[in-house]
Amino acid sequence: MEQRRSPGHDQWFYESQTRPQHSAAAPLVPEAAYLDDRFLLGLQQEASALQPLLLRFQPALLAARDLSQILFPDSLTPSLTHTLTLYDRLSTALTVAQVAGVQRLCNHYAARLNPLPGPDSSRESNNRLTQITQYARQLAMQPALITANSISALDAVGLTEPDIVTLNQLVGFVSYQARVVAALQAIMGLPVRWIPGVSPPPDADAALFQPSPVWQHALKPVELRYASAEQLAAITFCQGMEGLEDAVWLLVHDAQTLYGWATLQQRLNDHFAQDEALVQAVSARILGCQRQFDRFAGSARQTLLREVAGDNPLVTVSAQLTRLPERFSAAHLQPLLNAGWSAERIFTLLQAVALANWQDRLSMALGETR
């Protein structure tokens, strides 16, 4: 039986179950769609006491804000090679925000999605949106379960290689954004929601972290002879950046996002030190990203493979923010404050965790060898 979408975009209905009313249901917080900063989502106005901190990281925060505009513009015209609509993108963002559980993000993406026309009522459109949503939820929740079959399923519903790269960047960006927002809310001491019965998925199996072949692309990378001027500029900008050597020719399917992502990493890496390498290794261990774990774990490798726990507050903080950003609170930061850490040092550490959550998901989805 053919399915039809109601005007409020709140549910799918079979033809025999359509409702008589035709007024779209308004989002609970409609004003969340109209924010000047679509990365911090109004936190900068609430965090007046943290203005020196935000000013210190302004270059990185501006890069993240630019990325939010690139990935979620006010309007978008799909093409034959880039078929993801603005509805597809915001629907994906809302799915990832709901997995993370950070209400500020859910409000924003729901409010922006609400007035947009949804896909038509054909079975093909329904299957396409369902597959995109399932993939986004899986990558956001438990990326270790993403396989080559997951990518093939996207191809089967008509997504192109640039589409698949962009979709993974969307999931990675919102995963990063959710953890930066959760980190700032914790530094500000804001209360967190506690939903009974919610538990994180299990950590990735330690058996994944074995000697393996070189990382390989899950999709066909861009060939030099076919690269556009914009793609060549992005590749040139990324030359010499650690961690991007093998992936750049694949990620350049979405050149604008790659350029923005590399800019963000470059500006954040200026602040990172040894402690940031440890927390990025913790994220990779929990999510199951062998490539990033090998890069960052160092002497902590065997300890983290046995158990992601213990008395080290850096491991504890990174694990909590990776697993359950919705429950990340000021209480998790107290051990670091007791040890004399400044707000700037703490925010640097938490941004490293957030960035790792993006890098790990991207690496695993687009070519991690298992």
Image (tube, rainbow, N blue to C red):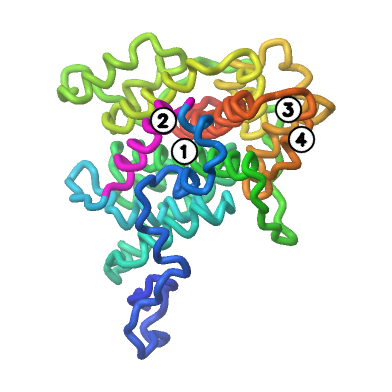
What residue sits 39% from the left and 87% below the top? Answer: 19
Q: Which residue is mark 4?
A: 334
**What type is the residue that disc 2 sits on?**
Ala
How far apart in space, not on screen, are marks 1 and 3 (Cα)?
Answer: 21 Å
* Labelled disc at residue 315: 3
Identify the mark nearer the N-term, 1 or 4. Answer: 1
x and y, in percent, of residue 229 in the image: 15, 22
x and y, in percent, of residue 16 in the image: 39, 87
Front residue of 357 and 189: 189
Q: Secondary structure at mark 2?
A: loop
Left-right relation of 183 to 135 = right
Quadrant where the N terminus lies? bottom left
Whether residues under marks 1 and 4 lie with C-beta atoms below 8 angstroms apart, the answer is no
Whether residues under marks 2 and 3 lie with C-beta atoms below 8 angstroms apart, the answer is no
**What type is the residue that disc 4 sits on?**
Gln
x and y, in percent, of residue 76 in the image: 22, 50
Question: Circle 1: is it few (<14), some (14-19), or many (20+) Cα within 10 Å?
Answer: many
Q: Which residue is mark 2?
A: 218
Q: Decide whether residue 68 is among the magenta residues.
A: yes
Camera-near label (3 vs 4) is 4
Camera-near label (2 vs 3) is 3
How far apart in space, not on screen, are marks 1 and 2 (Cα)?
Answer: 17 Å
Q: Residue furthest front?
A: 49
Q: Decide whether residue 50 is among the magenta residues.
A: no
**What type is the residue that disc 1 sits on?**
Gly
Q: Which residue is mark 1?
A: 172
Camera-near label (2 vs 4) is 4
Give the residues in magenta.
56-73
